Image (cartoon, helix red, strand yellow):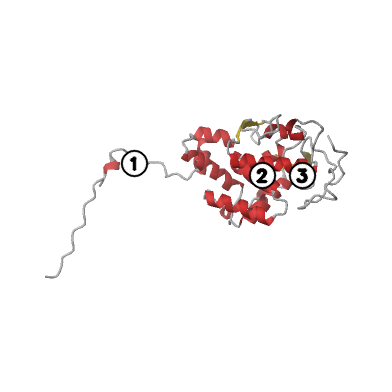
């Protein structure tokens, strides 16, 4: 692989490749790990009321892509990231852990079906990845060509479109694997990919949609699957959610029925309103 020893400090993220487009010196085979100790994360959580709960419409999805394309000079990476979030329901940390092999077939094509490895899943259980949308696969293929053009994690082999299959699929703007920060606090050890989170938040800011967040995209996917007939268990499997109640909370569906069958017949034929007396 065309890479050298990683620098001791990560380069700041930016829109354009450094220098003249030469290979970036980096370690791509696994996410960069850093462990820190933090107090309780209670004050680090964004208020839920600021997040959009309503799923995106098709027109809104197209508008987000249009805004990202016009707002970022090198738009291929963020557009691929946005579509991956929407089409898989994966969380940013999980996408930061995906390898080229997870997304790209040996012949260089984007996989139609794959698996999110247990090691990448936040819940620690592998789950299916379905990339059956042509729009999504085209965006991911464009990102692959972008990486090859900048020689980010390329090899001399023609397999995997010349990308190192063990390198992380999504890299930051300097061609490095996103750093994974392991925090130790009162509620135990947690992992967080701040660089990947910021890349996602940048997309959300550019979208112009108030409150857009990762959970909005997961809701959008869950509702589209529900409308197509997917069961709660199937949606939960795709999103990595075991609790059926949690799945139902993502769905825009009418509240559960609370009346008995006989009560549903109350006034099923409504009493007509009496005509008002008219002056004669």
Cα–Cα span, label 1 and label 2: 46 Å
Question: In the depicted view, which residue is nearer to us: 188 or 14?
Answer: 14
Q: Residue furthest left?
A: 280
- Residue position marked by numbered label 3 in the rendering: 37
Residue 95: in sight, yes or no?
A: yes
Mark 3 Cα-neighbour bin, 10 Å: few <14, some 14–19, many ≥20: few
Q: Quadrant of the N terminus?
A: top right
Whether residue 35 is situated above or below residue 211 in the rendered picture: above
Name the N-terminal-most of marks 2 and 3: 3
Cα–Cα span, label 3 and label 1: 51 Å
* Cβ atoms under marks 1 and 2 closer than 8 Å: no
Relative image position of residue 249 (x, y in whole percent)? 50, 43
Whether residue 15 is situated above or below residue 130 in the rendered picture: below
- Residue position marked by numbered label 1 in the rendering: 259
Residue depth check, mark 3 versus mark 1: number of the one nearer the observer: 1
Name the N-terminal-most of marks 3 and 1: 3
Label 1 element class: loop
The answer to which image quadrant residue 186 occupies is: top right
Q: Residue furthest bottom?
A: 280
- Determine which of the numbered discs, if any, sits on residue 80 in the image: 2
Mark 2 Cα-neighbour bin, 10 Å: few <14, some 14–19, many ≥20: many
Left or right? Give the position of 252 relative to 50: left
Left or right? Give the position of 2 relative to 169: right
């Amino acid at each position: 692989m065309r890479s050298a020893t990683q620098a001791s400090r990560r380069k700041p993220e930016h829109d354009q490749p450094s220098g003249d487009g030469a290979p970036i010196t980096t370690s791509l085979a696994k996410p960069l790990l850093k462990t820190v100790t933090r107090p309780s994360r209670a004050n680090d959580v964004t208020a839920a009321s600021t997040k959009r709960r309503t799923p995106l419409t098709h027109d809104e999805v197209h508008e987000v892509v249009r805004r990202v394309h016009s707002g970022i000079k090198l738009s291929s990476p963020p557009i691929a990231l946005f579509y991956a979030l929407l089409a898989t329901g994966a969380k940013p940390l999980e996408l930061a852990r995906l390898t080229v092999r997870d997304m790209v077939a040996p012949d260089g094509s984007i996989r139609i079906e794959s698996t999110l490895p247990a090691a990448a899943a936040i819940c620690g259980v592998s789950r299916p990845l379905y990339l059956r949308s042509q729009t999504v696969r085209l965006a991911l293929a464009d990102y692959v060509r972008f990486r090859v053009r900048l020689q980010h994690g390329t090899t001399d082999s023609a397999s995997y479109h010349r990308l190192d299959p063990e390198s992380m699929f999504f890299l930051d703007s300097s061609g490095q694997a996103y750093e994974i920060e392991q925090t130790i606090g009162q509620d135990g050890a947690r992992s967080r990919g701040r660089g990947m989170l910021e890349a996602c938040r940048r997309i959300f800011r550019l979208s112009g949609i108030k409150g857009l967040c990762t959970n909005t995209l997961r809701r959008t996917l869950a509702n589209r699957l529900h409308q197509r007939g997917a069961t709660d268990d199937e949606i939960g499997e795709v999103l990595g959610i075991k609790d059926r109640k949690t799945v139902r909370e993502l769905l825009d569906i009418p509240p559960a029925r609370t009346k008995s069958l006989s009560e549903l017949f109350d006034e099923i034929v409504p009493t007509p309103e009496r005509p008002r007396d008219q002056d004669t």
